[in-house]
Image (cartoon, rainbow, N blue to C red):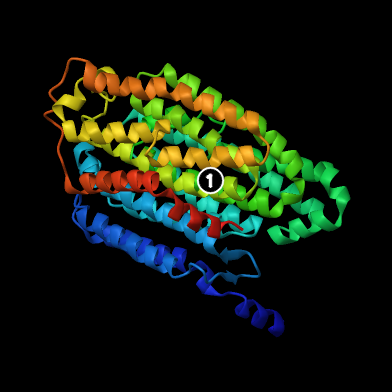
Amino acid sequence: MENLVQDAIQNVNLAAVMPSLVLCCFGMAILLMVVFLPKGKTAPIAWLSLASLVITGFVSLAAWGSPETGFYGAVQLDNFATFFNLTFILAGILTILMSEDYLQREGYPVGEYYPLILFIIAGAMWMASGTDLITIFLGLEVLSISLYVLAGFFRGQLRSNEAGLKYFLLGSFSTAFLLYGMALVYGATGTTNLAGIAAALQTDGGLLGNPLMVAGMVLMSSGFLFKIAAVPFHMWTPDVYHGAPTPVTAFMSAGPKAAAFAAFMRVFMEGLGGMADQWTSLLWVLAVLTMVIGNVIAIAQTNIKRMLAYSSVAHAGYALVGMVAFNEVGTAGILFYMLAYTFMNLGAFAILVLAGKKGEDNLTLDGFAGFGYRRPMLGVAMAIFLFSLMGLPPTAGFAGKFYIFAGAVQAGYIWLAIIGVLASAVSLYYYLRVMVYMYFRDPVEDFAWVKMPMGAMVSIVIALVGVLLLGILPSSVMDLARLAIF
């Protein structure tokens, strides 16, 4: 017994979870501070949350090139986890910057909002660094539970109530499928460690056709596909994105989606790499359906938040192309794309935060008429973000799609790349339609209510710099992404 305890202590290695540990400590401290602050005074909490993310970012950067493994190989803080950790932190910083004035405007200045974002990022970090199915599941639960609360944060709005309840119910079902799949994989291999699963598949060829393994793989994929909002597990996306507070929608489309992709890649590329012939065939079909259906349904949307929700579905399809490719360019392309998508999508949502009235009923195409004339600087910024979402050069969206489709071509999936390019061409219609309303429709509103708070403006500037920098000089970030893949 004494040897077991000593062995367990030696395998703890807190350095492997240091970024998430720092963030959790800050989150709990901030949560306690909320109790002692006057009601409605959330600015100190917001700034302290930003500081905690910046500090955590430096802690994460310190781990680059110095991998740490702990807890009997259940957690690995390698370059892959560090790259995604920095993406999560960036998404959190941009979200918090655009949130303070928004919450005051909507009448929900509640301090608990900010520590929930920190806990979501901590859960995302466990998902990215988890090399054991149990660790990944724990990270997913921490992330999901906090996200359910934020989706329904506006308790007085039926739309927000619907978003929170729908996301909770459907998310619970998807988590059950994921956990059941993990149980089946454990039953077939006798381990939940990804390296152990990979070794079992390599030594026992019979496992490749084992019904338990195949069923476990399918069930786990359905759980991850729900989290990334891929077809046919995307039906929750438009209602949840529409009903949730706009900064939460922005964060949800970037941070948790990137975390789901990180865990998806860990489990399938590292653990189930021996079954690649089976799951790449499945993902090929789902990537096509996700790209096509997401873009086609987005055409019919008149509410901009719902349009961006279906756009988010389509972008999940583009990233799935990189998983199907399963080579260096495609895999590194996913990391690059998640970072690029964080900049361009959060930037677009930051514009919506400023343009929306209280209640946000004006966030429609008609409500955006003349926005580019009334608010020229914001109109130009929105146009750049939309160009990036379309995938036009010289923006980050173009570079991201180029790397992913190049990976598919390199792997021999030429038709998949062609379908991806054609689906991306379809998106030009609904993105350009927003710009047509901004610049070629007579203004219905004077947009006098649009304020320029410092936080939101800083988030827009950061997003613009990121979109243009990754578009003009993508190779340096792509080189880092190549160093990050396992």
Relative to 68, is 221 on the left or the right? right
The residue shown at (26%, 49%) is: 97
Q: Position of residue 151 (x, y in %)?
A: 40, 39
> Which of the 4 image quarters holds residue 357?
top left
Instruction: Reply above or below: 87 against 227.
Output: below
Relative to 420, is 213 on the left or the right? right
Mark 1 residue element: helix
Instruction: Reply above or below: 425 against 136.
Output: above
Q: Position of residue 153 (x, y in %)?
A: 35, 40
The residue shown at (55%, 24%) is: 292
Relative to 223, is 481 on the left or the right? left
Image quarter in which the N terminus is found: bottom right
Q: Position of residue 255 (x, y in %)?
A: 44, 47
Q: Which residue is mark 1?
A: 334
The foreground one among 344 and 108 is: 344
Q: Position of residue 369 (x, y in %)?
A: 22, 19
Res. 154 visible in picture: no
Query: Of the residues shown, which amino acid type is indicated by label 1?
Result: Ile
The residue shown at (60%, 28%) is: 288
Res. 111 visible in picture: yes
The residue shown at (51%, 49%) is: 335
Please rate how many residues cluster around mark 1, counting C-alpha atoms within 10 Å: few if below 14, some from 14 to 19, many from 20.
Answer: many
The foreground one among 86 and 248 is: 86
